[in-house]
Image: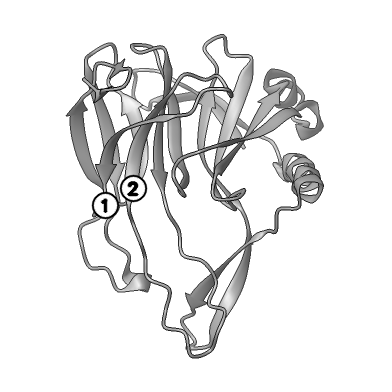
């Protein structure tokens, strides 16, 4: 994990970036995996040598977002899923961890599931305008379980959700993007617009579409029971 200071100058990164090992955090997540009986993530990959195989990926954290008071970092996982739901774990003590360059200072205080309709988290951010979290979610390929099974299709089926931040409340889907591979989401300052960055191209999977496409959406909040407005 890396922390650095950004300023509106050239170069934009000032000071010395601080890096801590995420190993202790991963070990802590592994303990939770054991407790809830979640298997590490594996996916089918046709490697460059031509030897098709399933590869061990453990899991991947694709979205991180600080709580409004800055005390807690939420880490959203794309994989593995828990019964079809995305997993999010919460960290505290990051300031101490970075100040001492000791990852042991960061403690996992919670791990919970969010129902994103079979998708994992590809990005998340706190939205100061709607006072909730914006979540980009997408599906991923699984392992190839039979030698005669065709290459698992890349079912993109991305969607955007708004979540109150309360574990008892289900995220609300306000947009679906079945033909996009959305990897990032954020609010554009204090405007009514949000931006999403998608990555439709992937040479390794034979997808020749454009990469790093930026889309701006008008999103002013959620009307309960009616979707986005």
Q: Is residue 202 left or right of residue 33?
A: left
Q: Please, is residue 63 above or below residue 204 in the view?
A: above
Quadrant in the picture for the N terminus = top right
Q: Work out which quarter of the rendered image holds the C terminus and state it.
A: top left
Residue behind mark 1: 178
Q: Is residue 210 left or right of residue 1?
A: left
Q: Position of residue 118 (x, y in %)?
A: 47, 49
Rendered position, 171 above or below 223:
below
Q: How many marks?
A: 2
> For the point 34% across and 36% down, which residue is it?
160
- Residue 185: image x %, image y %? 35, 33
The residue positioned 29% from the left and 15% from the top of the image is 189
Crowd rating for badge 1 (residues with CA inside 10 Å; few <14, some 14–19, many 20+): few
Q: Judge from the rendering whether residue 62 lies leftward or rightward of residue 161; answer left or right.
A: right
Q: 6 or 104: nearer the eye?
A: 104
Please say if 135 is above or below 151: above
- CB under 8 Å between discs 1 and 2: yes
Q: Position of residue 89 (x, y in %)?
A: 65, 34
User: For mark 2, does the 10 Å Cα neighbourhood hold few (<14), some (14 to 19), or many (20 or more) residues?
Assistant: many
Q: Tell me what residue is drawn at x 50 percent, y 38 percent.
A: 115
The residue at 57%/79% (across/down) is: 145
Corner quadrant of residue 194: top left
**Mark 1 or mark 2: whose residue is earlier in sequence:** 2
Q: Determine the secondary structure under disc 2.
A: strand
Question: Which residue position holds label 2?
Answer: 158
Residue 9 % position (x, y): 34, 19
């Amino acid at each position: 994990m890396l922390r650095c200071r950004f300023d509106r100058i050239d170069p934009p990164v000032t000071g010395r970036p601080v890096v801590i090992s995420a190993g202790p955090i991963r070990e802590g997540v592994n303990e939770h995996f054991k407790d809830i009986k979640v298997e590490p993530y594996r996916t089918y990959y046709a490697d460059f040598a031509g030897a098709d195989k399933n590869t061990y990926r453990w899991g991947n954290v694709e979205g991180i977002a600080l709580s409004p008071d800055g005390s807690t970092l939420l880490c959203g996982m794309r994989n593995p899923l828990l019964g079809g739901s995305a997993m999010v774990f919460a960290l505290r003590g990051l300031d101490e961890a970075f100040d001492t360059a000791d990852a042991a200072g960061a403690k996992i205080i919670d791990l919970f599931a969010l129902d994103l309709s079979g998708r994992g988290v590809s990005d998340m951010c706190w939205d100061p305008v709607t006072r909730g979290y914006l979540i980009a979610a997408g599906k991923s390929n699984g392992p190839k379980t039979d030698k005669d099974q065709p290459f698992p299709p890349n079912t993109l089926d991305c969607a955007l959700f708004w979540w109150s931040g309360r574990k008892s409340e289900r995220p609300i889907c306000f947009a679906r993007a079945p033909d996009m591979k959305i990897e990032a989401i954020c609010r554009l300052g204090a405007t009514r617009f949000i931006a999403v960055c998608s990555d439709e191209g992937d040479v390794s999977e034979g997808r020749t579409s454009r990469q790093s496409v930026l889309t701006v959406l008008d999103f002013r909040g959620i009307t309960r029971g009616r979707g986005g407005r």
